[in-house]
Image (cartoon, helix red, strand yellow):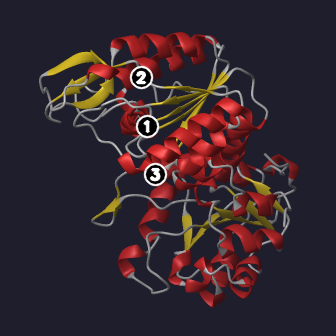
Amino acid sequence: MSEFKTIDDLEVAGRRVLVRADLNVPMKDGRVTDTTRIDRSLPTIRDLKAKGAKVIVLSHFGRPKGQRMPELSLKPVAQALGEAMGATMVFGDDCIGEAAEKAVSEAADGDIVMLENLRFHDAETKNDPHFAGRLAELADVYVNDAFSCAHRAHASTEAIARLLPNAAGCLMQAELEALGGALGDPERPVAAVVGGAKISTKMEVLGNLAGRVDQLIIGGGMANTFLYAQGTDVGNSLCENDMAEQARAIITDAAAAGCEVVLPVDATVAKEFAEGAASQTVPVDAVPSDAMILDVGPASIDDLVQRLQGCRTVVWNGPLGAFEVSPFDLGTNAVAREAARLTGEGTLLSVAGGGDTVAALANAGVADKFSYVSTAGGAFLEWLEGKTLPGVAALSGQN
């Protein structure tokens, strides 16, 4: 990861600090139903407030596409943030112009201001420099605490960082440090666990990881395509037959880079995908023609557990099986719990995120036992692909 400043590097007492957070939270009937993103934004806001800054919070909410939509107002989010902070919020009915200026001017040092939905202006998603300039006029310092939005070059994540002294917030800092430790300059051996349904959605992820890790562990429906590409009959399993050539290319490229591609040796199969469906364990080369692979089998679990015990770093993206339905969550649960155990012992750095990963780890009861679990979704996947994230590049001064 590139060098970046943190809020500890800033003098913020008596200054207006614009914080870009991701408060795009679930909402029902005007009430926030999941406060996870609010909770994760609190350390940065509390720290700045305690240092005497006038904190001005920016966020998007939904996809209003440049239109003012009352149902996508951030006002209920501001109320929820105020409750979480135990503080009175000053709300601005717009994020630029007179309404925003009035809200900022009326707030005292140490107060918290939240401005209205950035995406009520289409200039936000167009990364319009004039719009970014109007945002910058409201503050003396810019802090980006929204890694989950860092893969988009928007005015509030990219252009504005070039107009004000800037730093990463606590959440952004934690994310960048965790990701840097996992793939930037990791302790080896490094394993990557990549699961999910289709390799067609993760070709860039697989291609990047194959050149950067020591073991590329492939599970879920993706593994079926790799097995098929090697001539294994996977029966009625989910399989992208037309991706066989690409799968073989990944194996070839990985071998050239000194990376071992690890596939299941046995599988739990069933004739239907349903809760409590009759299932059996078979070697991967003995899948019945009318059955489908829904999880890795016990021999594969034992193999992966042993492999993790020999690793110092693991990056995890995607489940090993159809974890949403019992008993096809056994493989993901067992391997995730071993990763969590090794993390707890201090022998493994474990970083996970993207797609169904958070839900799969929660199902295994270990979402809080990995070194770091990212909820960033698209930004996490683009990082796995090796792409430069505009919001991060702007903080570090890259062009």
Against 109, residue 265 (above or below) is: above
Compute the Cα span from label 1 to label 2. 14 Å
Looking at marks 1 and 2 on the same chain, the residue that comes earlier in the sequence is marked by: 1
Query: Residue 200, labelled with which disc?
Result: 3
Looking at marks 3 and 1 on the same chain, the residue that comes earlier in the sequence is marked by: 3
Against 349, residue 162 (above or below) is: below
Q: Amino acid at mark 3?
A: Ser
Secondary structure state at the residue bearing disc 2: loop
Q: Residue at x 38, y 58 (%)?
A: 26
Q: Amino acid at mark 1?
A: Ala
Q: Residue at x 63, y 11 (%)?
A: 310
Q: Is residue 191 left or right of residue 320?
A: right
**Closer to the camera in the image, 294 or 2:** 294
Quadrant, the N terminus = top right
**Closer to the camera in the image, 280 or 162:** 280
Q: Amino acid at mark 2?
A: Pro
Against 281, residue 328 (above or below) is: below
Q: Residue at x 50, y 57 (%)?
A: 81
Query: Residue 175, labelled with which disc?
Result: none
| Residue 61 rendering spot, x and y as whole percentages | 47, 69
Residue located beneath label 1 in the image? 229
Quadrant, the C terminus = bottom right
Answer yes or no: is residue 327 visible. Answer: no
Residue located beneath label 2 in the image? 264
